[in-house]
Amino acid sequence: MPDRPGRLASLAREHGADVLLVTDLVNVRWLSGFTGTSGLCLVGDGGEGEPVRRFITDFRYDEQSAEQLDAQWQREIAPDLMRRVTESLSGPLVVGFDDAHMPVKQAQSITESLAEGVTLEPAGSLVEKLRATKDPGEIAAIRAATELADAALTEVLERGIVGRTEAEVGLDLEFTIRRLGAEGVSFPPIVASGPHGALPHAVPRDVNIEAGTLCVIDWGAQLDGYASDCTRTYATGELSADDRELYELVLSAQLEALAGVVPGSEGKAVDSIARDIITAAGHGEHFGHGLGHGVGAEVHEAPRLSQRTDSVLVPGHVVTVEPGVYVPGKVGVRIEDLAVVTEDGHDVLTKLSKQLTVVG
Ligand code: ZN
Ligand code: ZN
């Protein structure tokens, strides 16, 4: 693992914090390797003194944390983690905390218990900023999660989907993902056929998937702490000309936008590529979500590809490209790939074909 605590400590210093308090467990895992459910980190560059690398957990995780954390961490066992933090700090000291993850109430109560001269300052999402750029080990983990997810859907499609309920296919997919060795799904699979496909976040229903329509399947696996995310839309038989046309529209928007995933591209500009194509075809108002999002330890993270972001792609970013057209009461199409930004372009991790495919 590259020097994540060191990089975070420098970033905290740039934001005016002597130490950063990291409480979100996904961030704690990313930073320290600890996978338990109770733990927090305090990191700082130490100013004139030694760098701060404290990890605090409770007695249940004494042994596990000893195995998972490397020697740079000072491990502490305490019944009340936050109390240990507040009692051990002395001023003058600025403690940064992630206001995106800590409720205001908790921040207030911490502030009240801090010693004189110790102040708590919001320093939002610094870990997320670093997490957005993946190292080769992380890219390998996301690639492995994606391969597993691809294999799982391939298996499920071989068993057929027409005549089964959406819920049944979703459960089959979830089960297959687990059986192939994933920790779990990265989110509950979406299986949405016919008019139901027009809901971008459709929950699978106890309704049979019929022949001759479109079926949106959005799924991902969680493996070794990393997520995958992919969507394919399948034909369940002969389609109407309108449905076929809609599919080809979304596919062309997806391919064009994907080509824009290169270092230096603005998230907003890449979103516009797909949005302009879909809008020109008269479906602008049927594409109501952003084009894509980062994927890593969490299935939705930085950077975003949308009209409401100032993100700029750099090598190591892993993003989805997922335009969709949702025609209320009729049908929906979404096609989503997961791609890693490389030095000279991108590498698509999701490998299943995007040509319109009929599944029985
Ligand atoms: Zn997805
Ligand atoms: Zn997605």
Image (cartoon, rainbow, N blue to C red):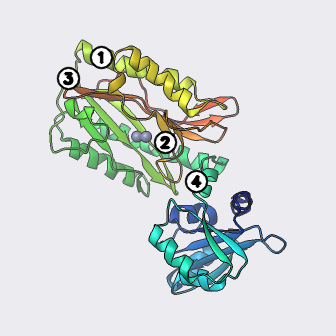
Residue at coordinates 49% horizontally, 52% vertically from top-left?
298
Indicate which disc, 3 or 2, sits on the residue closer to the N terminus: 2
Indicate which disc, 4 or 3, sits on the residue closer to the N terminus: 4
Q: Position of residue 244 (x, y in %)?
A: 30, 16
Q: Amino acid at mark 3?
A: Gly
Spatial distance from mark 1 to mark 2, Cα to Cα?
28 Å
Q: Which residue is mark 1?
A: 244
Spatial distance from mark 1 to mark 4, Cα to Cα?
40 Å
Spatial distance from mark 2 to mark 4, Cα to Cα?
25 Å
Q: Which residue is mark 4?
A: 128
The residue closer to the viewer here, 97 or 315, is 97
Q: Which residue is mark 2?
A: 147
Assess whether mark 3 and mark 1 are in contact (beta carbons under 8 angstroms).
no
Which element carries disc 1, helix, strand or loop?
helix
Q: Is residue 117 above or below residue 237?
A: below
Which element carries disc 2, helix, strand or loop?
helix
- Front of the two marks 2 and 4: 4
Which element carries disc 4, helix, strand or loop?
helix
Indicate which disc, 1 or 4, sits on the residue closer to the N terminus: 4
Q: Amino acid at mark 4?
A: Glu
